Image (tube, helix red, strand yellow):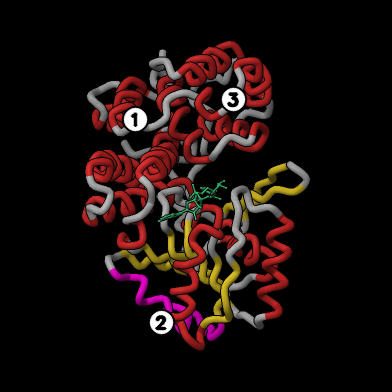
Amino acid sequence: MIPPFFYNTNPARIFFGQGALASVADEIRRQGCRHALVLSTPFQKTEAEALAAQLGELSAGIFSEAAMHTPVSITEKAMSAYEAAEADCIVALGGGSTIGLGKAIAYRNDAPQIVIATTYAGSEVTPILGQTENGIKTTVRDAKILPEVVIYDPYLTLDLPVRMSVTSGLNAMAHAVEAVYAQDRNPISSMMAIEGVRALRDALPLIVANPRNVDARGNALYGAWLCGTVLGSVGMALHHKLCHTLGGSFDLPHAETHAIVLPHSASYNAKAAAEAMEPLANLFSGSIGDGLYDFAKSIGAPLALRELGLQQAQLDRVADLAVKNPYWNPRPVERDAVRALLQRAWEGARPE
Ligand code: NAD
């Protein structure tokens, strides 16, 4: 029997395909806009400049100072640039950091957002914004934050470095792993989650072998879209709480942290959510924790939190913070068990 469920969709327009970048001008006009501020990180400034040139009169210029964790000071600078340029919409070109800046602007002035996603983090399809001020990261959820248009063009991901592709892909999978056991899951979110993990499982080894394999890049981006979509529609649990703690309070890098913690958090919940996780376990030789660990190792992902600079002496504090105000989780969040999980993740040991 299918149990009763609620199903909410986030109303974004998605354009997926090789060469989809060429549609940005049409999408700006379709939003009723005519002057777009193009956003990027300093690292992707050249691509942002090329896009602004492609847009011609539709470009209001570029702002290329997007940074990880969306610092409010940078958002304020970008708001000034937006107003000075008399922009009427945002074009964000990049990963979660650039997309976060676009969302932060839209949260303040409701600017329409056209997002061109170039990593697998999934932020482009969620109504969630995390922003940092005075070292404190807060998260808001609001309909204004959800981008109106998302463009996925596999060509733009050909130069995403292999290590970033691997960790970002595992970051995407983590959304889907938590979605299949979410308290508010439904048959559609679970279907998307399983298909997203399958697509990434197939694509990532091919990308490691040849980063410019455009078909594999397309499959990975397709998987990332599905995984991001479930992140935006159902609740997340222990895995995301651990990564938010490690990122927010210990400044660990986002995608790498997700990649390292995932086999351990999946293993923690494997028995309690066995039925919901079975289709995913089957994608990884029948054992979700071991299977994800072996998969991550086979594609060269980092395996140990100590590689990211976390000190063993900090693990007690991480455990204390992670069990404080826990997110709902299928298995009770017990301090000693979480501390043991963190120890293994810190060492890079196989999950329990
Ligand atoms: P990122 O956006 O920080 O990108 C990392 C680096 O890679 C940047 O220098 C970027 O310019 C570069 N880069 C991106 N795409 C590239 C490409 N195709 N080729 C070459 N270089 C490229 O990394 P991320 O993991 O995508 O995003 C992390 C941030 O996103 C974190 O702050 C995280 O909290 C946030 N996030 C938010 C949500 C949400 O729903 N609110 C979801 C996921 C992530």
What type is the residue that disc 3 sits on? Leu
Question: Which tag is nearer the camera, tag 1 or tag 2?
Answer: 1
Looking at this view, name the residue that lies furthest to the bottom.
Answer: 57
In the picture, the disc for residue 296 is: 1
User: Is ligand 1 within 8 Å of the beta carbon of the residue shown at mark 1?
Assistant: no
Task: Work out how far the residue at label 1 is from the one at label 2, CA to CA, in angstroms.
Answer: 39 Å
Circle 3 residue = 310
Q: Quadrant of the N terminus?
A: top left
Query: Real-space Cα distance between discs 3 and 2?
Result: 46 Å
Identify whether 266 is placed above or below 193: above
Instruction: Please state the horizontal and vertical placement of residue 347, each as a whole percent of the image.
Output: 48, 16
Circle 1: residue type: Ala
Secondary structure of the residue carrying tag 1 is helix
- Residue at 44% over, 19% down: 348
Q: Residue at x 43, y 37 (%)?
A: 174
Q: Residues within 10 Å of mark 3 (few under 14, many from 20)?
A: some
The answer to whether mark 1 and mark 2 are in CB contact below 8 A is no
Whether 46 is drawn above or below 171: the answer is below
Camera-side mark, 1 or 3: 3
Q: Which residue is mark 2?
A: 26
Magenta residues, as a range? 19-35
Determine if the magenta segment contains residue 29. Answer: yes
Q: For numbered disc 3, what is the local secondary structure?
A: loop
Count neighbours of disc 1 (C-alpha within 10 A) and say few if under 14, some if 14 to 19, many if 20 or more: many
